[in-house]
Image: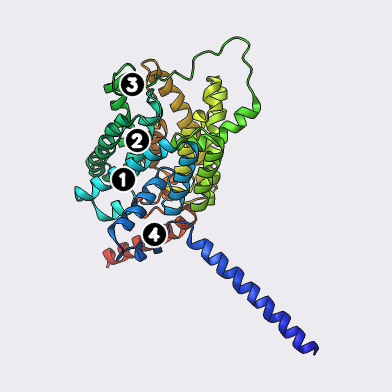
């Protein structure tokens, strides 16, 4: 009798263990780059493939490559503003379809590389518009600007490939500045708000609110997608966490560093409270802290330095462009990351080739395989 009871207990323990392993395995399938989904979608209808490509493009905005992260981001945008969600969805579809029609590289299209710039352009056109939500004429520049991102991406790609550099968001930064310069604040069809420099002095007696500053650190992650609401920003951070916990930690760290840089330069309180001070710091820290470099204590410190440089460069560019009412967008982080990727010396040995970049947790394996391949090539050359 006791033997039977022990066997039943052992069997129940094994069943619980198997269930937990299955749950863990299922969760792991939803993290990282989800490459197994691409194999599954190969023989599926074009509409379903387009949906996955579009979701990857949405996730690429936060430096992720996970369609489920993209779905979470769309949910966050819909929560914050259905109009912005519509513009973002239209932008990513317009740019992805343009890439398909113009015959761009199929791996780039399926990886969402032709979608994220279009989404960012459409989101920023909506944010800066002073015509209000549901202004349907805005769909025209959204579709046109998103489509033009593909041509800029295609033109910049062979130039930057010479130094193994990603095109990143250069097309977005170029097109949004051109759009704002073309339209102007008093345009009868597409009016927009003017941007104020962050260095403008505060009114006398205005005190800094610590809780709002702390809240601004979380909003700094949401501002990557032009989202200034706390709940949706937390959901966007959850989308980063789903893709890579290490990337999410660096996003928060970079946003905190950017906020600290803003405090040290006495920027306007609104820049701190809204998360705009942390935006470029978050991007700079995420790109270096495990995405384009193998994670180690050296690259972790390197990521913090990148966040500081991105944040201070953003303050400088925002003050410069703000004099003519233009935003600095993510120019600071884009230029800083490009500079970091061009660095030589010991840190360059941690650099991951652009074509082999994966989720930070998998990048270590990717790096070791790349080094093994290089060693084999050298041996074959010697022979």
Which of the two discs, 4 and 3, labels the residue nearer the N terminus? 3
Count of numbered circles on the image? 4
Residue bearing the label numbered 2: 122
Q: What element carries label 3?
A: loop
Quarter of the C terminus within the rendering: bottom left
Residue bearing the label numbered 4: 371
Instruction: Please say if the residues under marks 4 and 3 sit with CB atoms less than 8 Å apart.
Output: no
Mark 3–mark 1 Cα distance, whole angstroms, equals 24 Å
Query: Going 29% across and 66% down the picture, which residue do you hit?
Result: 43
- Residue 2 in view here: yes
Which of the two discs, 3 and 1, labels the residue nearer the N terminus? 1
In the drawing, what numbered circle is on residue 191? 3
Which of the two discs, 2 and 1, labels the residue nearer the N terminus? 1
Q: Where is residue 159 shown, x and y percent of the image? A: 24, 41
Seen in the picture, residue 293 relative to 337 is either above or below; the reply is below
Q: For this rendering, which residue is in front, 354 or 256?
A: 256
Q: Tell me if mark 1 has few (under 14), some (14-19) or many (20+) residues whose alpha carbon lies within 10 angstroms of its own.
A: many
Seen in the picture, residue 335 relative to 67 is either above or below; the reply is above
Q: For this rendering, which residue is in front, 100 or 136?
A: 136
């Amino acid at each position: 009798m006791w033997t039977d009871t022990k066997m039943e207990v052992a069997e129940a323990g094994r069943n619980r263990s198997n269930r937990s392993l299955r749950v863990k395995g299922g969760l792991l399938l939803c993290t990282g780059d989800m490459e197994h989904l691409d194999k599954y979608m190969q023989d599926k209808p074009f509409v379903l493939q387009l949906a996955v490509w579009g979701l990857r493009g949405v996730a690429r905005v936060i430096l992720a490559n996970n369609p489920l992260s993209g779905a979470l981001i769309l949910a966050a945008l819909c929560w914050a503003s259905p109009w912005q969600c519509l513009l973002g969805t239209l932008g990513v579809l317009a740019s992805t379809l343009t890439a398909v029609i113009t015959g761009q590289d199929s791996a780039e299209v399926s990886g969402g590389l032709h979608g994220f710039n279009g989404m960012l352009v459409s989101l920023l056109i909506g944010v800066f518009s002073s015509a209000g939500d549901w202004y349907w004429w805005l769909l025209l520049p959204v579709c046109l600007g998103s489509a033009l991102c593909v041509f800029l991406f295609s033109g910049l790609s062979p130039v930057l490939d010479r130094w193994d550099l990603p095109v990143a968001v250069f097309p977005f930064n170029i097109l949004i500045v051109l759009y704002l310069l073309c339209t102007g604040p008093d345009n009868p069809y597409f009016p927009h708000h003017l941007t104020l420099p962050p260095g403008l002095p505060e009114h006398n007696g205005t005190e800094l609110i610590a809780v709002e500053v702390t809240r601004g650190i979380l909003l700094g992650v949401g501002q990557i997608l032009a989202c200034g609401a706390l709940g949706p920003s937390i959901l966007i951070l959850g989308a980063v966490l789903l893709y890579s916990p290490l990337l999410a930690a660096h996003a928060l760290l970079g946003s905190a560093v950017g906020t600290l840089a803003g405090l040290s330069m006495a920027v306007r309180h609104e820049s701190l409270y809204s998360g705009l001070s942390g935006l470029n710091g978050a991007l700079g820290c995420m790109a270096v802290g495990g995405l384009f470099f193998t994670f180690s204590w050296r690259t972790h410190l390197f990521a913090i330095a990148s966040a500081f440089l991105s944040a201070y460069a953003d303050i400088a560019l925002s003050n410069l462009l703000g004099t003519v009412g233009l935003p600095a967008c993510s120019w600071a982080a884009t230029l800083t990351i490009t500079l970091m990727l061009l660095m030589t010396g010991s840190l360059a040995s941690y650099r991951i080739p652009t074509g082999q970049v994966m989720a930070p947790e998998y990048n270590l394996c990717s790096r070791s395989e790349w080094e093994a391949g290089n060693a084999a090539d050298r041996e074959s050359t010697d022979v």
